[in-house]
Amino acid sequence: MKLVEVVLYEVEMKMKTPFTTSLGTMQNKKFIVLEVKDEDGVIGWGEGVAFEEPSYTEETLKTSLHMLEDFLIPALLGKEIVHPDDVYELLRPIRRNQMAKASIEGAVWDIYAQKQNKSLAQVLGGSRPKIEVGISIGLQPTDAALIATIQRFLDEGYKRIKVKIKPGKDIELLRTIRTAYPDIPLMADANSSYTLEDLALLKQLDEFNLMMIEQPLAYDDFLDHAKLQKHINTPICLDESITSLDDARKAIEVGGCGVVNIKIARVGGISEAKRIHDYCAEKNIPVWCGGMLEAGIGRAQNVALTSLANFTMPGDTAASSRYWDEDLIKPEVMVNDGYITVPTTLGLGYEVNRKTLEKYTINKRVFSI
Ligand code: MG
């Protein structure tokens, strides 16, 4: 295929409720939607999920726009692309900027799947007809609010609960949850808010029978996580630290990572996400699919990716309605009794609702050859 046109939409949507982590609080999400057309007129959709502030990784909405406009779109327009894996190679000379790269690579996967007469899940080799869904709950103002929120999602059928923790909101918070719910599948995500100086505190996590502790230490570290793993039984899961297959290999080789959270955007696209999945399967390391508060297009990609066999743990891909009053796709991503059915229609498996997209678009530019 040859890409002949890219329409770049800057979109702003208000989240139903603010989402708070150790990194900050988000209420309105500004993000990028890419509509990519090939020479046969087939259209693929991509989503750029970088936040406005460089708190999760170094990328932001503005750096993504800069990279797309000045480097990534020009590097791909008019180039011969046989398979979406070629995009990773074509963009390899441009260092990092994984989220910006993933936004356009995802659209190429959508086009490729349609041209193969398959769904995205099918071209990826996904084997699950439905995927298990967990929920990620931000920091809550009170214990009562936290318990009420957990109860609401358990009632909706979500299969595991993930809570955000940070220094000062950790051991007592987890004790409160475990007292109320001794047996639910539970995990905690620290978003890099501790160091090895907190070893005594981190050792206490073992008493809560957590499925894993996610990214307790620095966002770019493997070694300290390996040291920590020697002192705690709770498996360490890495999120921020894994930006490529090579990172996953290093983290696993040094013993700093027993579980991998795979995010398409954080690793530069669907191709690299699949490679990490395949590598972890070989090494018997379970993986699950994390979230970036995606709207429908990114969410649909997560559903397709999670249909791969080694996604043995429930991910963060919740229903559209968990975050949005109105999503950009139809049908919206729906959760039934803790499961999302993987669509079998061509490409993404969900249709972009152009009316809704236009309604939330604040800026739009067209690039073509
Ligand atoms: Mg995380």
Image: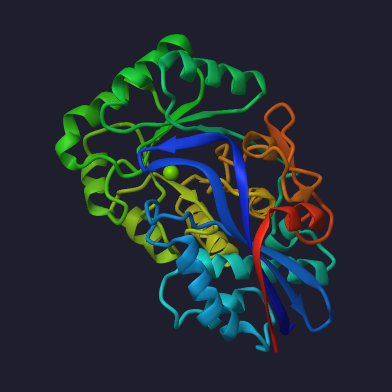
Q: Is residue 196 left or right of residue 80?
A: left
**Quadrant of the image occupied by residue 45:** bottom right
Q: Quadrant of ligand 1?
A: top left
Quadrant placement of the C terminus = bottom right
Viewer-proximal residue, 62 or 265?
62
Residue 301 % position (x, y):
66, 55
Viewer-proximal residue, 277 or 76?
76
Q: Farthest residue toward the left?
A: 197
Residue 340 % position (x, y):
72, 38
Numbered label tally:
0
Q: Image height check: is 224 above or below 279?
A: above
Residue at 18 percent across and 34 percent down: it is: 199
Residue 135 % position (x, y):
56, 32
**Quadrant of the image occupied by residue 25:** top left
Residue at 40 percent across and 58 percent down: it is: 248
Query: What coloring was used for the rendering?
Result: rainbow
Q: Farthest residue toward the top?
A: 179
Residue at 41 percent across and 18 percent down: it is: 142
Residue 350 % position (x, y):
79, 52
Residue at 32 percent across and 52 percent down: it is: 219
Q: Image height check: is 93 above or below 282?
A: below
Q: Image height check: is 208 above or below 361?
A: above
Quadrant placement of the N terminus = bottom right
